[in-house]
Structure formats: structure tokens, C-alpha cells
Image (spheres, grey):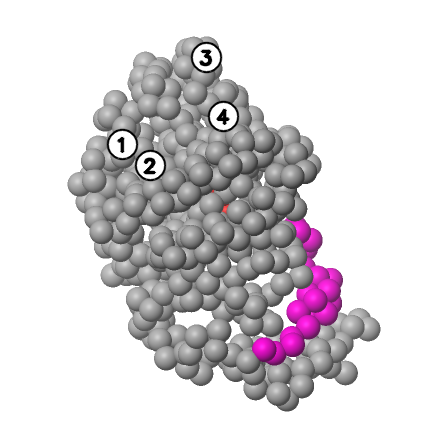
């Protein structure tokens, strides 16, 4: 009955992979693939040393697809293991990862420090619920606030609400801004402003802040009160942000929208207008924050006059363990009372302790300097490619290790060809290649990946 055909040698080659027949559902006999963890990652041998097992991922994927809500389009590859900047699929094919799980695995895959913190904490306490204190939620909040203030970013950062994802962090920010608005005594002060090409998440509030027809239309009507402007359009700000605006949400560097950097002039003007009308300025640094630009926070390079009232983060905060955070000023926190907001999992000791470890490392000066330096290596090399293929590459954008390569054509085939050649790379916005690698990527790996990319671009350039 087992539909998955794994020979004994294949099972051995895949290391700790075992199979067992699951109870059939309908007429489909469905295999269960278990990856049992018998060795600690620190002692695991490199996946590249494994023999070439022919595991028919395609077959498994096709069968399991019937059990999953079809929200994603994915290639027929199944990733089994990672180490640093590399991933291996179930056929032991090795890939260099320029995606870091979409700006999540900044410390790389299977990081030993993260793994040992998870192991230690999991043996002690994973969850207790938010009706009780635990040693890590408060300690993580303290670390985030103290480090943020010391970094020169968000001067008035004061308190943190810990949750589980980016969307939830933004959802909390939206609710907090509404509460601040309503506390002004003006019941009509419930409006929000966000910007075209932004991405703030998929929950109803964060989706309402994400003016993308493709994402919003099937689920309308959106939460009322959202108005959309254009990033960096300074002149439009006075009309956009009014007395009835309670919150403005903006990514200092738009990620999904195509790596568009908000200008200092724009963000200073936005903050000034928010202060004039008493609106809360929210910076969504879920993708661009936590060291990705080479600063702890992307807005850290801005003057105090452009600092936010709320800052949201998630993605890299747990290096893959789900966690998000909404950082607020004392003024915002003062409007939130017990019972206003909550979460079951948010701030559980496991995720909070991992995030404490991860945040400490991502915010270290050595790490931030390396991100800046490696960002420079990418920019120099990509600049050369732009000169070489001017008909195909029109612009290189971004800061540190969040980089957009603007192409003159749809990059879908380029991404597929790169993947076939062992390089994972993302798209963003319109015709943009997005590079958000782990911070631990080496110079050699950067050159390796860019060599693959160049090979693929050279071919694509002939077709434009
Ligand atoms: C800037 C930004 N905000 C919010 C989100 C939503 O985060 P999550 O997918 O964790 O809900 C994302 C995810 O890509 C993002 O890039």
C-alpha cells in the first residue's frame, strides 16, 4: 500500500529518514515520511557528504498536494536540510541560498547557537500562556528596547508587545493606533494611510494596509478607513494625512514591492505631518530591519525627527522560529490597558528565548559591519553586471543585504534557471530580482552565486 517507493539503500542514504504507511484517506494510500532526529545538528555530518539518493519528491509532492489548501505555487523540490548559506534537497542536490527563507534565516540554516538554545529551552519549558510570567518575554522586551535606544534608532522606544508573525505585529500596531486615535476624543479619528507597492501582511487589518488588487480583491470589503498614497511623494502628504488619520504605516524599504527605499525627506515630512494631526507613525521593518541594511533598524540612519511611534518586526527575529514584535513609545503604551489585546503563543518562553539569542547576535557591531561590507561586495559585482548588460539591468537598489536588481523583463525564467543551476533567488515588485541572503554568507559564496546569476543573465540579455 505504500505509494512512496524508497529502496533500503535510499533510506540509508537519506540518513534518518524512515517511512511508514498512514491510514488511507479515501482511496489514496498516503506515505508518511518521518525525519527522526537522532543526532544533534552540531554532530551531524554535512549533507553534501550524503550519497546521492533518488528520492522521488515529485511523487510525494503530487500526492500530498491533495491534502493542502493550494495557496502556494512551488517547484517540485523538497528541501530536507540546511547548513549556513546552503540547502540540500531530498536528492542531495546542493543550493546556495540568496533568499534566507525570505529574509528570515539571517544567521543561516541550522545555526549551532540557535539550535542549542532551542534544545535547552525545549527541555525546560516551551509554553505557559500569558496568564503567568516567564523568564524570557520580559527579558527579550528589555533587550530590544535598550539595544534599540542605544543604536540611535527610535529614540522613544519604550515597551514591546510580543506576538507570532509579521502580520500579527502589524495587526497590533493598527489596533494600538486606532486606540490612540479614539482616545483623542475625536471618534472619527480612525483613518489609516499606507502606500502603493507596500506589503504588510495577509490578515484583514494588515491586508487592508496592503493596496495590492490581487491580494485584496478576493477578500473584500477591506477594513474601512484605509487610504493609499505613493511612496516618496512629499507634496501629497498634507492631503493624504488628515485630522481623521489615526495611523500611517510605511516600510522604510519596501521589500515585496521591489526594494524601494523611502527617502529621508519623505519620512521626515511624514513624521512632521503625523505630529501636526496627532497620528501615529508606524514603521514596518519586518523585512528590512534587524540588521539587514547594516544598521540595527533601517530607519536608524534617519534623524530623530523621522523616528516612528510604533516599529514592527518579525521574520529574522527567531531565525525561523515564529515570533513578531510591536515596539511602541510610552505615549502609545499609555493608551493600551489590560485586556485590550492578547495572544496565546506570543512571547512563549521558547520563541522569546530564541529571539533573545538571535537579537543579541544580529545587533552586534561586528555583524552589522559585516552586513555593510558584504552588501558592498554585492553592489560592486552587480554594478559590473549592470554595465555589462544595460539592456537587461536598469537599476540596482537597496542597502546592505536587501538588494533589488531591476530588470527590463519578467524574471520568472531567470529564477527557474538559477535554481536549476543551484542558486535560490527571489523576485519582488515588477520585474525585480530580490537578494536577501543570510548574513553569514561568505565572500566566496557571494561570488559563486553571482557567477551562476551572470551565466543566466548573459543568456537572458541576448533575448531583450
Ligand atoms: C514588510 C512586511 N511586513 C509584513 C509581512 C508579513 O509577515 P508575516 O508573513 O510573518 O505575517 C511581511 C512578509 O513578507 C513583510 O515583508
Assess whether mark 1 and mark 2 are in contact (beta carbons under 8 angstroms): yes
Residue bearing mark 1? 301
Instruction: Tell me which segment is drawn in magenta.
Output: 52-73
Separation of marks 3 and 4 at Cα, in angstroms: 12 Å
Whether disc 3's CB lies below 8 Å from ligand 1 is answered no
The nearer-to-camera label among 1 and 4 is: 1
Residue 69 belongs to magenta span: yes
Q: Earlier in the sequence, mark 2 or mark 3?
A: 3
Assess whether mark 4 and mark 2 are in contact (beta carbons under 8 angstroms): no
| Residue 30 x, y percent position in the rendering | 72, 74
Residue bearing mark 3? 236
Describe the element under mark 3 as helix, strand or loop.
helix
Q: Earlier in the sequence, mark 1 or mark 3?
A: 3
Residue bearing mark 2? 298
Describe the element under mark 2 as helix, strand or loop.
helix
Q: Earlier in the sequence, mark 2 or mark 4?
A: 4
Q: Residue at x 46, y 12 (%)?
A: 236
Amino acid at each position: 500500500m505504500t505509494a512512496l517507493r524508497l529502496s533500503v539503500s535510499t533510506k540509508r542514504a537519506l540518513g534518518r529518514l524512515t517511512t511508514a504507511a498512514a491510514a488511507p484517506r479515501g482511496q489514496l494510500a498516503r506515505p508518511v515520511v518521518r525525519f527522526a532526529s537522532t543526532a544533534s545538528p552540531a554532530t551531524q555530518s554535512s549533507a553534501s557528504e550524503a550519497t546521492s539518493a533518488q528520492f522521488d519528491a515529485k511523487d510525494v509532492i503530487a500526492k500530498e498536494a491533495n491534502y493542502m489548501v493550494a495557496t502556494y505555487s512551488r517547484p517540485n523540490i523538497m528541501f530536507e536540510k540546511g547548513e549556513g548559506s546552503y540547502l540540500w534537497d531530498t536528492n542531495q542536490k546542493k543550493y546556495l541560498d540568496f533568499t534566507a527563507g525570505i529574509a528570515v534565516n539571517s544567521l543561516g540554516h541550522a545555526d549551532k547557537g540557535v539550535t542549542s538554545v532551542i534544545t535547552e529551552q525545549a527541555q525546560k519549558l516551551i509554553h505557559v500562556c500569558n496568564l503567568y510570567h516567564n523568564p524570557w518575554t520580559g527579558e527579550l522586551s528589555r533587550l530590544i528596547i535598550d539595544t534599540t535606544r542605544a543604536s540611535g534608532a527610535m529614540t522613544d522606544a519604550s515597551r514591546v508587545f510580543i506576538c507570532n508573525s509579521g502580520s500579527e505585529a502589524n495587526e497590533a500596531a493598527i489596533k494600538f493606533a486606532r486606540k490612540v486615535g479614539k482616545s483623542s476624543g475625536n471618534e472619527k479619528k480612525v483613518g489609516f494611510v499606507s502606500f502603493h507597492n507596500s506589503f504588510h501582511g495577509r490578515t484583514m487589518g494588515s491586508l487592508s494596509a496592503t493596496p495590492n488588487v490581487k491580494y485584496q480583491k478576493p477578500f473584500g470589503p477591506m477594513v474601512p478607513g484605509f487610504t493609499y498614497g505613493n511612496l516618496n511623494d512629499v507634496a501629497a502628504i498634507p492631503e493624504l494625512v488628515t485630522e481623521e488619520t489615526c495611523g500611517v504605516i510605511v516600510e522604510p524599504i519596501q521589500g515585496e514591492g521591489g526594494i524601494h527605499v523611502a527617502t529621508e525627506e519623505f519620512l521626515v515630512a511624514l513624521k512632521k505631518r503625523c505630529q501636526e494631526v496627532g497620528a501615529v507613525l508606524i514603521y514596518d521593518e519586518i523585512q528590512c530591519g534587524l540588521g539587514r541594511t547594516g544598521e540595527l533598524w533601517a530607519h536608524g540612519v534617519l534623524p530623530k525627527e523621522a523616528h516612528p511611534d510604533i516599529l514592527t518586526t518579525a521574520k529574522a527575529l527567531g531565525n525561523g522560529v515564529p515570533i513578531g514584535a510591536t515596539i511602541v513609545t510610552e505615549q502609545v503604551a499609555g493608551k493600551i490597558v489590560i485586556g485590550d489585546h492578547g495572544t496565546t503563543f506570543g512571547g512563549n518562553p521558547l520563541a522569546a528565548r530564541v529571539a533573545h539569542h538571535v537579537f543579541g547576535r544580529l545587533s552586534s557591531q561586528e555583524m552589522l559591519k559585516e552586513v555593510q561590507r558584504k552588501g558592498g561586495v554585492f553592489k560592486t559585482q552587480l554594478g559590473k553586471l549592470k554595465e555589462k548588460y544595460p539592456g537587461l539591468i536598469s537599476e540596482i537598489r537597496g542597502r546592505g543585504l536587501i538588494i533589488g536588481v531591476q530588470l527590463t523583463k519578467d524574471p520568472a525564467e531567470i529564477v527557474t534557471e538559477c535554481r536549476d543551476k543551484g542558486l535560490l533567488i527571489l523576485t519582488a515588485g515588477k520585474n525585480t530580482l530580490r537578494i536577501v541572503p543570510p548574513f553569514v554568507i561568505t565572500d566566496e559564496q557571494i561570488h559563486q552565486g553571482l557567477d551562476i546569476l551572470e551565466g543566466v543573465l548573459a543568456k537572458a540579455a541576448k533575448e531583450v
